[in-house]
Image: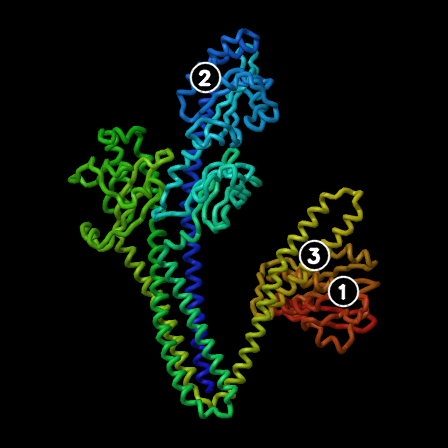
Amino acid sequence: MQTKSKTALVIAIAILAIIGAISFYFSIYTKARLTEQTVQKMSLVAKTASENVLALILRLETDTTKCTTDQYICAEIEALEAGEDGIRVDALNDYLKQKLQTTQQIFNIDIISLSGTVLASSNTERVGHTESLAELNMEYRFSDAAEAKYGQTFLSEIVSEVGEPGHDADKAFHISAPIISPITNKPIAVLVNHVFVDELNGALGNWQQAELGIPSESFEVYLVNKRKLMITESGLIKNAALRQTVDTEPVKGCVYNEQETTGEWKNYLGTKVVGAGKCLQQMVLIAEISEKEMLSSSQLYKLEKIAFYSAFVLAGALIALLLILLSISWKNRKQKELIAKPLKKLFVSTYLIAVCMVLALSFLIAFALSQVIKSSFIESRYELTLPHLSKLLEKHVSDPLFLQNWQQAQVRNDFENFANEIEDLPGIMRIKIHKVDGTVMWTDLPTEKVGYVENIDNLQKIKKIGEAIISELPKEEARTFGKSNVIAIHQPVYFGQIEPQAIVEAYFDAEPIYTEMRRIQIKTMIIAIGVMFILGGLIFLFSHKANKKYIFKLVQLVNERSSELLRVRQEYTAMLAHELRAPLTNIRWAVEGVLGSLNKKQSEERESLESVSNSAITMLSIVNNMLDLTKIEAGKFKIKPIKSDIAAVIKEKIAEFIPQANNKGLNLNFASDKKIVNFSFDPIRIGQVIINLLSNAIKFTNKGSVTVSIAKSSDGKRIHVAVSDTGSGIPADLMPKLFQKFVQLGKDDKSDKNRGTGLGLAIVKGIVEAHNGTVGVNSTVGKGSEFWFELPI
């Protein structure tokens, strides 16, 4: 098989791989955007649903407080506690039954003495029944209520309890509050309201049926208690309340850290979902939808996945073809001429197919890019306008009953002031204000009637989710405004309520935005198609190269592969170092934390942990050296010079080595020329140079001293820094290789205590040369060594 055919096929495979990678990247990008948008929707759903639940609980707590402050109830309980006759019990039971009829949420009211006996109840069969304190605390938080002050209420967890037919009666929760004696001003009994758990289901019912703009099979909103049990019914499985364990990320976040969670996780069925969690009293509220359903709603995501898989399949087919042809070429190398013509025809066909696929996929990618840009561009342009419309309307409308009084002059004047203030919004052409049922309350067109119900697209989505809708009008509707491109915005306004109270409808002239957007789209398409044509041209160019350049190209390829291998090795080293640095840092700080908690008597544990900490620090130093050396070799090493005092930097680093020098009985000296001036250098990196040189000097010096000196060169243009020691010196044959990587000064030391990684001096050389400086060494065996470097001023 000819070299040009192999080259053409390899390049075709590479192009398809690039196309697949681009398609895969954009599918990931689209998925991230969909996830972000869905998380925002789920957060809004969770916020509104949690407000509904809290509003229900607040209403129940208010009802409970009213009962505990009822004068008749307080007087009767005071009398019962004083031991008066039981006629009062029957009267009080009847009174509690009357109270029960005023609320639909509560199915039973108990008044329990501080000793645990039911004094009165709307369910007369419970009167006289006594429970243990443990049972009362588990069901009612009895002790908390019995010791509470006036106005305090306590919400229990969901428990199993026999109730009335027609309800989820074996599951209930309770609101408990103290009954305070008007005489002693102390609790004399505890009032307990029993509430059906299906009241919570009712508070979430509307959200369970929400459609998010598409028919949804996996969207649900539910509550979980602190014991990680679902306490409202599931939309996916039957009889889940108090039976289904939910140990998902939102539950863990609220139970363990009181931290709310949004994003992606696996739900209680193991399905990957996108949603949001809210931490409530004794509960966690979760709103979620399956990731699969979320992605199925995006045609753009499907298109990008199809492009990715198409490129992947075609590239795989071409790779298989290449392997087959290589195999044929190898087995029949002596009969090459016999198969040359069939192979040539096959490669011409493959070449033409590859070119056609490149062109088709280039247009496909360009189109996908343009659609992503269009969607992002429109949303980004109006994302600040939406809250502006809502806040301004809330600001101007002062009448809390404006929905009933919208025809009155004052409310209409408020609407007019709102419209006048937003006239300066770029491109705004028309404004309407609706009720949530679509009734037009106000319009800026004097000739248009009000009071009629207008059909608003996606009205149910606006009402249920409370999300603004940004849509592009069809060309026919846009022409009624005298424009070719018009954007319509429907923004819900809440006026401090849970549900939207009104909808602002605004129309904007989008032609200037579309002109700018088209310019970006055209540029993107031109770049994408141009890249594909360039790659196609490269296929043509390389596939027709003459065989006479084969040897030259082979040598060139070897060089390129060598460089690539070097780059891969550098990248792998950098990646490995990065991956090691995080866990080593965690180990170090974890050990330091444990060390801080040990007392003085735990000496053995402290010694072991200090050994671990020192090992972690050593390994971190090695990892950092690997990273620095990789950057130096790759030519990506950067310094950050600032005007600094080099003497101060060196003194600081010397101070760090004083304990180490003292342990070995060495004198650590510093000498500086008084003429040294401040100049620009990277103090952190020069500090690293001093650390490496001092570390080596102290390591290989057993007696005597180590001296660091600074002086100005004779021409006054450079600073000379030297680190000298009285150690064993360096052999002459080792000195020329001393600043190369992996050269170890202590490699002949059998104890290994003085052996290093061989990276320190290579890094020193790289740092100094990055400053346009020079580095060197002078040494005499048996007398010591002097490592020096010079930096330009």
Q: Residue furthest top?
A: 84
- From mark 2 to mark 1, how far is it between C-alphas? 90 Å
Q: Say whether residue 747 is left or right of residue 539.
A: right
Element on which disc 2 rests: helix
Q: Does the rendering let one see residue 771?
A: no
Residue 379 picture location, percent across and down: 35, 51
* Disc assigned to residue 697: 1
Q: Does the rendering let one see residue 728?
A: yes
* Disc assigned to residue 579: none
Element on which disc 3 rests: helix
- From mark 1 to mark 3, how far is it between C-alphas? 20 Å
Q: Is residue 199 above or below residue 549?
A: above
Can you tell which of label 2 and label 1 is closer to the viewer?
2
- From mark 3 to mark 2, how far is it between C-alphas? 71 Å
Name the one closer to the observer, 647 or 376: 376
Element on which disc 1 rests: helix
Q: Quadrant of residue 387?
A: top left
Give the amino acid at mark 3. Answer: Ile
Q: Total number of numbered labels? A: 3
Q: Say whether residue 36 is left or right of residue 147.
A: left
* Disc assigned to residue 617: 3
Assess disc 3: are there few (<14), some (14-19) or many (≥20) residues with their C-alpha within 10 Å of its C-alpha: some
Q: Is residue 768 above or below residue 491?
A: below
For disc 2, the marked residue is 96
Give the amino acid at mark 1. Answer: Ala
Q: Say whether residue 118 is left or right of residue 753.
A: left
Give the amino acid at mark 2. Answer: Leu
Colour convention of the picture:
rainbow
Residue 467 picture location, percent across and down: 35, 43
Residue 717 picture location, percent across and down: 63, 68
Residue 579 picture location, percent across and down: 60, 60
- Dot 1 or dot 3, earlier in sequence: 3
